[in-house]
Image (cartoon, rainbow, N blue to C red):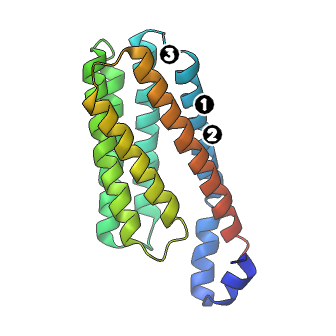
Amino acid sequence: MANGQAGADLSPGDRDVLRILGRSWGWVLFFGIVTLGAGILVVVRPKDTITFFAVVVGIWLFLSGLFRIVMAIADDEDTAGTRWLVALLGLLSVIVGILFLRHTEQTVTTLAFLLGLFWVVGGLIEFFTAYSDRGSDARGFRIGVGVVAFAAGVVTLVWPHLTLATLAVIIGIWLIVYAVLMVALAFQLRGLSKL
């Protein structure tokens, strides 16, 4: 459905809300580009030290968590329960990111377990919040992100003994896929600002 046709079916108040949401597209695009950079770095340099790996992933998790917390606070369209779940996911991301940054000397297995656990829990939260939000244009995107995160988490938890290089490549590919989805969402949001 074209933006003009979608806009014709909306009340003036709904149109204003969508325009405000659409104006945030630049932040989503920025986050997508940062995530893409992190993914490429991890894939290109998978055999580097555990410190480099932990710092890159830790920074990404920390920024991702802050982004989710801000989105949960700024979003007045979702239910309070959905906003709390998104904020909880953001807080979990910040905590795991800090653990990665503070405990870079830990083994790959420990880091893999923390990241796998985060992805499983985060994927489930993302999936169920998106599934319950039937009116959202980004519903399919969010369900896809939840499924991919859950799958990546399961793989990481089932095979925590993977070598650093293999684990780094899996995480790097996940970050690149996530970044591409974020960039696509940013351009979808940009279209909302023109309603």
From the viewer's perspective, tell me whether residue 84 is left or right of residue 191.
Answer: left
Residue 149 is situated, as x and y percent measured from the top left of the image, at 40, 44
Of label 1 and label 3, which has the lower sequence position? 1
Residue at image point 65% right, 62% down = 188
Residue at image point 48% right, 24% down = 169
Viewer-closest of 61 and 154: 154
Mark 3 Cα shell of 10 Å, populated few (<14), some (14-19), many (≥20):
many
Quadrant for residue 37, please give it. Answer: top right
Viewer-closest of 45 and 102: 45
Of label 3 and label 2, which has the lower sequence position? 2
Would you say the residues marked 2 and 1 are in contact, meaning their CB atoms lie under 8 Å apart? yes
Which kind of residue does numbered mark 1 sit on? Gly
From the viewer's perspective, tell me whether residue 57 is left or right of residue 193.
Answer: left
Residue highlighted by disc 1: 37
Mark 1 Cα shell of 10 Å, populated few (<14), some (14-19), many (≥20):
some
Residue 81 is situated, as x and y percent measured from the top left of the image, at 28, 68
Q: Secondary structure at mark 2?
A: helix
Which kind of residue does numbered mark 2 sit on? Ile
Closer to us: mark 1 or mark 3?
Answer: 3
Residue at image point 52% right, 43% down = 178
Residue highlighted by disc 3: 46
Q: Secondary structure at mark 3?
A: loop
Instruction: Report how far apart the C-alphas of labels 3 and 2 lie in the structure.
Output: 20 Å
Instruction: Report how far apart the C-alphas of labels 1 and 3 lie in the structure.
Output: 14 Å
Quadrant for residue 189, please give it. Answer: bottom right
Q: Is residue 95 visible?
A: no
Residue at image point 37% right, 56% down = 126
From the viewer's perspective, tell me whether residue 124 is left or right of residue 37.
Answer: left
Residue 33: image tag: 2
The quadrant of the rendering that contains the C terminus is bottom right
